[in-house]
Amino acid sequence: MRCTAPVQGHRTASGRANCPVCGGRSFGSYPKYPYVFPSSTSSITHATSSRGVKQGKVKARWAPSNSTILYTDAEIRTLTPVRENIEKRAEMQDLRDVFLCHAWDDRKGAAKELHDLLESKGVNVWFSEKDVPLGSTLLREIDKGLVKSRIGIVLVTPSFISRIKGEGIAEKELSALLARDLLVPIVHNTTFEKLRDASPLLGSRSGLSTNEESMESIAAKIAELVRL
């Protein structure tokens, strides 16, 4: 037997009485039915996050027509204002695509890996390992790199979180990037919860995480984000 509420309704006493399932039940006791939405013309798939929540994935509006890269709703919310600012600054000349903010301890590991992946996808990256000349003042070169970059990405690792707590150079870079509203956090080998404990302001922003996808996939999303 099936409840007749989805077809005939139960707004009257006789309607409820004639239902073979509900009979004389009160109005608020119907079984719950899931809503069925009409199919959309957008390309949508589903994925399960690390928290077990099923998430829809869609193409970004800035993606080229042949792109196969898909984003969660949270990623779209995070990256859309960054993309809008990139578009507003499109006519500015001589800008690097990305300023890569990272902890000193990651310069030959995860930061180098991310830098190489981005460069392999045509992204022009400011990276301290190659862009700070010998004998120059590091903080001054960082300031110059920030000014001449379209966006900043912050590689958040256990080492980076330690540097924030210790108010090292990473903290200075972080403050400048936050002030520009052109910031994408990338969490690697840690969590957003631990980031929030160390920096509530940065942790309040969502971003990308290697707990959800590979570093290469994240690099592909950044490359698509900055491509004009």
Image (cartoon, grey):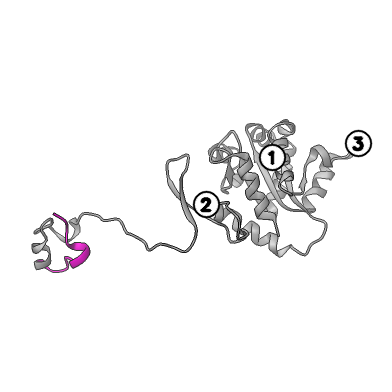
* Front residue of this view, candidates 80 and 228: 228
User: Going 73% across and 40% down the picture, which residue do you hit?
Assistant: 116
From what the image shows, is residue 134 above or below residue 83? Answer: above
- Say which element carries label 1: helix
Picture quadrant of residue 103: top right
Kind of residue at disc 3: Gly
Instruction: Give neighbour class at mark 3: few <14, some 14-19, many 20+ (Cα, 10 Å).
Output: few
* Front residue of this view, candidates 221 and 150: 221
Residue 227 appears left or right of 12: right
Magenta region: which residues?
Answer: 1-13
Q: Main secondary structure of the magenta part?
A: loop
Q: Position of residue 34 (x, y in %)?
A: 30, 56
From what the image shows, is residue 37 above or below residue 219? Answer: below
Earlier in the chain: of badge 2 and badge 3, it is 2
Mark-to-mark CA distance, 3 and 1: 26 Å
Quadrant for the N terminus, please: bottom left
Q: Position of residue 36 (x, y in %)?
A: 33, 59
Residue 114 - label: 1
Q: Disc 3 designates what residue?
A: 135
Mark-to-mark CA distance, 2 and 3: 42 Å
- Which one is in front in this view, the residue at disc 2 or the one at disc 3? 2
Earlier in the chain: of badge 2 and badge 1, it is 2
Kind of residue at disc 2: Ala
Picture quadrant of residue 109: top right
- Say which element carries label 3: loop
Residue 200 appears left or right of 171: left
Earlier in the chain: of badge 3 and badge 1, it is 1
Mark-to-mark CA distance, 2 and 1: 22 Å
Residue 74 - label: 2
- Say which element carries label 2: helix
- Which one is in front in this view, the residue at disc 2 or the one at disc 1? 1
